[in-house]
């Protein structure tokens, strides 16, 4: 099956829905849509209000769970342009998107990142502009990101131990990053969350360090269960562990789970009356992880990923290049019946996602 949809007439039998027709033609299918601007809702009645937009797949770190050998080849020269992203944001906003997160690779690689933040903030209907970053030279970027209107920032910190951090990421810069984080907390209004991949050999030490870090800081540290892809299977089998022992420790020590925001990510966050910050858990292997999925992903080349671990993507770049907001709206609506109910990680199937740098997780 090809990796992109064809939007053109077709003759075969089709199945109709209230606002679009999905037309099947061999291994491909085409779409005939109405002019409705009904909000994005899939066949499982999940409202999709959160867009994760990769603006580059290039990354300057060599994390052992993602790109242990570093980025291969040259950075593409055909990443989505500001004009294309303007059309993208307009279309998603018209369909009910209220939150946009810019991801990579590493999004700070793009020198126009502050301008992209402004595009989000200036798009009617979108309330929240976010970035996920590895934090490289964070202090250099903080002022520009804050002035552009950035609301939320997620940073990857897989260990609070400088030696372990260097071993995992290939970057020897944890002390500088921690100083920049304290600068952010004292000089900006940006909401900060830290993410770390949960690994068996570092789990306990990282939990103790995270608890110490959030004791007096308004920061959420989130443990993400290690997800298997085709590129990291050997490390996955050596390091994957359930987050249940983290959850048990938190509950036994007085932490309580909080309600999740309607446009929030997949984490369950825990708070404690004696701590300023929080601890979060992202558990992709839990039985009902996908039940409340609220997000779509678009790659830096303009392909829609209906699921992070889907087997196919769908090319919407022609609409973006032509500034065709209405065509984009119709195309996105027509994809709703085929958004999968859940991933297939339990079957060691990560779809076409060889590594998470492709669309930023």
Image (cartoon, rainbow, N blue to C red):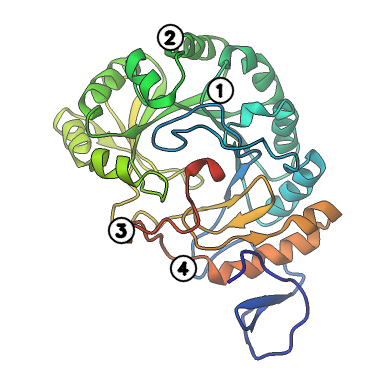
Instruction: State the CA–CA distance, disc 4 to disc 1.
Output: 34 Å
Instruction: State the CA–CA distance, disc 3 to disc 1.
Output: 36 Å
Instruction: Name the residue beneath numbered marker 4.
Output: 44
Circles 4 and 1: CB atoms closer than 8 Å: no
Instruction: State the CA–CA distance, disc 3 to disc 2.
Output: 37 Å
Residue 253 in the image: above or below residue 80: above
Residue 292 image offset from top left, x and y in percent: 42, 55
Between circles 4 and 3, the one closer to the viewer is 3
Residue 359 visible from this viewpoint:
no
Q: What residue sits 39% from the left and 37% below the top? A: 65
Mark 1 falls on what kind of element? loop
Q: What residue sits 51% from the left and 46% below the top? A: 263
Q: What residue sits 65% from the left and 20% below the top? A: 146
Circles 4 and 2: CB atoms closer than 8 Å: no
Residue 202 image offset from top left, x and y in percent: 25, 27
Instruction: Name the residue beneath numbered marker 3.
Output: 346
Along the horizontal axis of the image, is 192 left or right of 226? right
Between circles 3 and 1, the one closer to the viewer is 3
Instruction: Name the residue beneath numbered marker 1.
Output: 190
Along the horizontal axis of the image, is 100 left or right of 318? left
Circles 1 and 2: CB atoms closer than 8 Å: no
Residue 177 in the image: above or below residue 298: above
Tell me, for residue 175, which label it has, or none: 2
Q: Residue furthest left?
A: 252
Along the horizontal axis of the image, is 103 left or right of 286? right
Disc with the residue nearer the chain's start (4 vs 1): 4
Along the horizontal axis of the image, is 218 left or right of 235? right
Disc with the residue nearer the chain's start (4 vs 2): 4
């Amino acid at each position: 099956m090809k990796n992109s949809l064809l939007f053109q007439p077709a003759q075969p039998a089709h199945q109709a829905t209230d606002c679009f027709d999905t037309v099947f033609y061999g291994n491909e299918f085409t779409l005939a849509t109405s002019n409705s601007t009904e909000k994005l809702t899939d066949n499982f009645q999940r409202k999709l209000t959160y867009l994760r937009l990769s603006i580059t797949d290039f990354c300057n770190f060599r994390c052992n769970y993602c790109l242990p050998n570093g980025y291969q080849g040259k950075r593409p020269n055909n990443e989505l342009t500001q004009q294309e992203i303007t059309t993208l944001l307009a279309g998603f906003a018209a369909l009910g998107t209220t939150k946009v997160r810019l991801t990579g690779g590493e999004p700070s690689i793009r020198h126009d990142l502050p301008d992209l933040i402004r595009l989000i903030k200036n798009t009617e209907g979108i309330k929240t502009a976010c970035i996920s970053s590895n934090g490289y030279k964070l202090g250099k970027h903080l002022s520009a990101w804050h002035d552009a209107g950035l609301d939320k920032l997620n940073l990857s910190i897989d260990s609070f131990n400088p030696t372990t951090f260097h071993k995992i990421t290939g970057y020897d810069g944890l002390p500088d990053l921690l100083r920049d984080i304290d600068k952010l907390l004292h000089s900006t209004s940006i909401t900060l969350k830290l993410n770390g991949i949960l690994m068996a050999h570092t789990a306990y030490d990282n939990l103790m360090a995270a608890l110490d870090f959030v004791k007096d800081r308004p920061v959420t540290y989130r443990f993400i269960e290690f997800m298997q892809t085709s590129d990291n299977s050997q490390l996955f089998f050596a390091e994957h562990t359930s987050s249940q022992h983290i959850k048990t420790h938190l509950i036994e020590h007085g932490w309580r789970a909080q309600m999740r925001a309607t446009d929030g990510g997949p984490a369950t966050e825990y708070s404690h009356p004696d701590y300023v910050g929080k601890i979060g858990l992202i558990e992709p292997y839990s039985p009902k992880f996908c039940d409340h999925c609220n997000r779509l992903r678009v790659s830096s080349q303009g392909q829609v990923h209906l699921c992070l671990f889907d087997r196919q993507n769908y090319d919407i770049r022609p609409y973006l290049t032509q500034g065709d907001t209405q065509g984009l709206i119709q195309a996105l609506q027509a994809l709703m019946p085929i958004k999968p109910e859940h991933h297939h990680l339990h079957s060691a199937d990560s779809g076409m996602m060889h590594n998470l740098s492709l669309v930023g997780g």
